[in-house]
Amino acid sequence: MNAAPLPPLEEIDPALSEEINSYLEEWKDKEGNLIMMLHEIQDRHGFVPREASLLLAEATGVPMARIYEVLTFYNYFKLVPPGKHNVMVCNGTACYLKGAGRLLAELESRLGISDGDTTDDRLIHLETVRCIGCCGMAPAMVVDHKTLGKLNPTDMAGLIEGIRKREESGNDQ
Amino acid sequence: MMPKTIEATINGMPVRVPAGTSILKAAREVNVRIPTLCKHEDLLPTAACGLCIVKVGGSPRMPRACATALEEGMEILTHDPELTEVRRATLELILSNHPNGCLTCGRNLNCELQTLAGDFGIRQDCMPRYVREQEPDASTGSIILEFTKCIKCGRCVQVCQEMQDVWALSFLERGINTRMAPAGDIGLADSPCIRCGQCSAHCPTGAIIEDDETVTVWEALRDPEKFCTVQIAPSVRVALGEAFGYPPGTDLTGKIYAAMRRLGFKAVFDTNFAADLTIMEEAAEFVARFAHGKGELPLITSCCPSWVDYMEKRFSDFIPNFSSAKSPQQMLGVLAKTYFAKKQGIDPAKIYQVSIMPCTAKKFELERTEEMYASGHKDVDVALTTRELARLIKQSGIDFRNLPPASADSILGTYSGAGLIFGSTGGVMEAALRTAYHKVTGRNLEKEAIDIEPVRGLKGIKSAAVDVDGTEVRVAVAHGLGNVERLLLEVRRARDAGEPPPYHFIEVMACPGGCIGGGGQPYGVSDELRSQRIQGLFDGDRGMELRFSHENPEIRTLYDDFLGEPLGEKAHRLLHVRYKARPTYQK
Ligand code: SF4
Ligand code: SF4
Ligand code: SF4
Ligand code: FES
Ligand code: FES
């Protein structure tokens, strides 16, 4: 590969570099190694940190563009840290027409994150999904595997509060 | 072995083509045009759009003509009411995921999708429209990605990854969610993008367009405090005509000068003059390295800002090989605000310098490093592409076709044929060799030897050995960055093994064909078009009295009155740059 200078990687945790090096060592002569290394990274961190992809790109000469093509092709890979609680807003046609956008906007402003992100404390992950098959209850959401319907933006504050309360009382359900 | 020939029929007409020819191409042989949206002549088929379907024999299948080879005995049908209906439905489906924004689109009147919609007479939305919202990416200041207008044809991805080997663009996700995005899903300016604009030149729609700055130029022109000057790059003059109905390759230098004066520019310069100057500095550098052992060989040209950016990111171990001479655009800019300002007694702070370039990366070059402010001001204030110039002229009401030619302003306007051919792949090498030969031997190349044929043409990598008074100079020329790596790896290998360099002098231009094929040139690029534009430049060169940069009288005056010697102290301060290694990803 080329003698390309590293990107501004100074801030990257040396432990991460070491971890990546160990995968490189382990997989260097094996087939399908890129994807296997990505699996190892995800297993360890619960997602594939951008820095890990950068280090892999530099070490293997596989462009970042290609690595991200792989990462986003498989639903399995996550690019942001998972949250402990998953909040999914349905944005299918029925829900969209019944105001899913307003629910999302309310959640985004209350949580201070945007669609697809996780709060800094890694407590709540927010995402939009395609039709979840409950159009009769539009606009619908799924919060920690529980489906909720006929929601209003004013319900959002209570919903977030509920998650936080459950977390504090140590009760996951 | 003779290539096998295939015989078949298309719409009942017999065709004979070499084996492996696509049905699409074979149809052109019998003057049948099958509609296409994703296939581009420069690129391999992605078979993404489905418009080029045809019927084969009685089969109910409808294969895609761009990606299917013609086979012996096939009976192809390209057009019938059913095919037209299916094509229309396909188009309607594409349009249902496309904004209805033609009036305010960068490709209005010049869009492959719009043209097809027009040809098929689509007059209403037949399906509910769904367009995934996404903000455009204008982070580079050179090109703008308008994601909502992307039809996922895959051209830009192939261009950026294969043709240019930059890997700044890719498709992320899959199926219905597939989307074009900068590498690693970040802003384009933080990606490895080198601003070459080849993606914009190949995109069939308005999803990738140049950052239009015509309004900025109008504002400068109406400001009475400003002394607006302009320069025109070599390759612009043989391409601009395409926007006004001239055949590609028509040299319109005189008309362009005249249009500039009518637009209100107070002085009209020619980048060709600065190309001659670049040659003076670069040839001096080459001779110093080649004949006097001062510096690394091969010397590598550096007038292409995309190539400079690429080298700093990907091949920074070649920094010592890089010519430190600035590009003609920047040389002319600094001279306009020093030499010209002084001679004319104009306050350089009032000079507003516009450049007309074939290239989106030239916008980026203007502020690339602090050396681009060598005059004490921003040396060139704004760069417009050829496409923007065409618009500027159309807005101004100038009847371009009937405009009588004018001339440029003398002290930065005279040029040689060597300066003119700068716009083509191989042209910089040829121009530099003409002057280097003179520098080494004290005489000019014989008339028959002025044309250095082996470095001309569209082959991706060209090499030649040129005899300079009994000494062999080995040169190589690469264009299209996908071709550069092979060449540099060869040089690097020799260097690491302690062997003499395989070449003494290397020319690189980022775009296939060189600047004539630049990312800011009129649409519709193909090798045929590139050859026509190149022909325009070389015909111009051959028709000129003055064919050597070192014989340009204005260049001589410039050194005598102002600069001193090539590579001298003043030349260094104003006309040269330093390079540094840069990260490929800014994030
Ligand atoms: S890309 Fe073409 S069809 Fe789409 S809005 Fe622009 S001009 Fe119209
Ligand atoms: S401008 Fe060039 S480098 Fe940048 S995305 Fe387009 S093709 Fe790739
Ligand atoms: S941006 Fe243009 S070239 Fe790239 S995939 Fe979309 S439509 Fe095709
Ligand atoms: S659209 Fe939301 S549940 Fe079907
Ligand atoms: S041109 Fe053949 S599928 Fe698009």
Image (tube, rainbow, N blue to C red):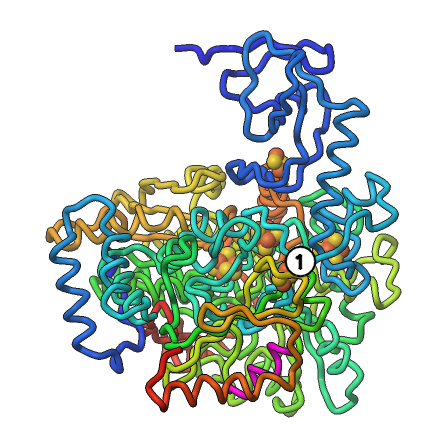
Quadrant into which the C terminus of chain B falls: bottom left
Q: Is residue B220 visible?
A: yes
Amino acid at dot 1: Lys
In depth, the one of A39 and B300 nearer the eye is A39
Up the image or down, A6 lies above or below B339; here it is: above
Name the residue rendered at 21%, 50% in the picture: B501
Lateral position of residue B206 relative to residue B395, left or right: left
Up the image or down, B244 lies above or below B526; here it is: below
Task: Label 1, secondary structure: give it.
Answer: helix
The quadrant of the picture showing ligand 1 is bottom right
Please state the total of marks drawn on the protein image. 1
Q: Is residue B516 visible?
A: no
Q: Position of residue B244 (x, y in %)?
A: 80, 51
Name the residue rendered at 60%, 25% in the picture: B63
- Chain under disc 1: B
Mainly helix, strand or loop, the magenta region? helix
Q: Tell me where the magenta segment starts and ends, as one range.
A: A103-112
Lateral position of residue B121 relative to residue B220, left or right: right
In depth, the one of B210 and A105 nearer the eye is A105
Q: Position of residue A117 (x, y in %)?
A: 46, 76
In the image, is the residue at mark 1 within 8 Å of ligand 1 by its beta carbon?
yes
Q: Position of residue A22 (x, y in %)?
A: 13, 63
Magenta-span inclusion, residue A108: yes
Up the image or down, B439 lies above or below B242; here it is: below
In depth, the one of B305 and B127 nearer the eye is B127
Magenta-span inclusion, residue B221: no
Quadrant into which the N terminus of chain B falls: top left
Task: Check disc 1 and report the residue beneath it.
Answer: B149
Q: Position of residue A159 (x, y in %)?
A: 53, 83
- For disc 1, the neighbor class at 10 Å (few under 14, some 14 to 19, many from 20) is many
In depth, the one of A119 and A21 nearer the eye is A119
